[in-house]
Amino acid sequence: MSRNPQIEHYLERALDNTAIVAALSSARADSTPELEQLAERQDTALYDLIHEFAFNARKVIELVEREGLPSAAIVREGQVGCLRADEGSEPDTECEISLKQIVNLIIHSDEFEIDRDHVPVPEGNESRTTAAWGFIVRSNPPRGKRHFVWIAFMLAEFLRFEQHLRKDLPVLRLER
């Protein structure tokens, strides 16, 4: 029995999460500094949405792997640039990990924190206010290393996977 309807269901949910995470993580209050007071609420919402995204993305990944679709290879490749910490330090060593590793780190996280900072703007300077541009995650302490993951890179890799997956799936007709 084909799992395509389940794949489509969880894929759509993950894409919905992707859209909202992208909007919240790129929101800055440069033009309206009063909105900076919403940063903590945005971070709380991002925490929940990123975990929901990870659950839905993992369901898609598991179903795609069970079906043996070629796009399953995409999620195992180390394509997402991040920073990894050596024991007792802040993440500062560049590395690449796969989308599958990232969603597993999020789902099994013992530490998860949204990271806000001033980000580059088109004029070449940094933004006046902060944006939630990444997160620090760690699972399985004390062995597990802390990773800093840029939200935009994670989402871009998921969208790359989604494009390959769409080529693997037949067009589904929804009858009403």
Image (tube, rainbow, N blue to C red):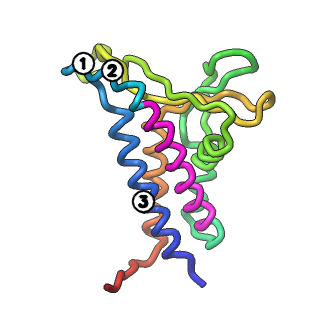
Q: Which type of secondary structure does the marked residue at label 3 adopt?
A: helix
Q: Across the whole image, how many numbered discs are drawn on residues? A: 3
Q: Position of residue 40 (x, y in %)?
A: 42, 25
Is 126 one of the magenta-colored residues?
no
Q: Which residues are magenta?
A: 43-64
Quadrant of the rendered image containing residue 122: top left
Q: Which residue is mark 3?
A: 163
Tell me if label 2 and label 1 are in contact, CB under 8 Å.
Answer: yes
The amino acid sitting under disc 2 is Gln
Q: Taking 82 as reference, is 46 left or right? A: left
Residue at image coords 45%, 44%: 155
- Frontmost residue, 74 versus 108: 108
Q: Nearer the viewer, mark 3 or mark 2?
A: 2
- Frontmost residue, 113 versus 159: 113
Is 46 one of the magenta-colored residues?
yes
Asked if 117 appears above or below 137 in the picture, the reply is above
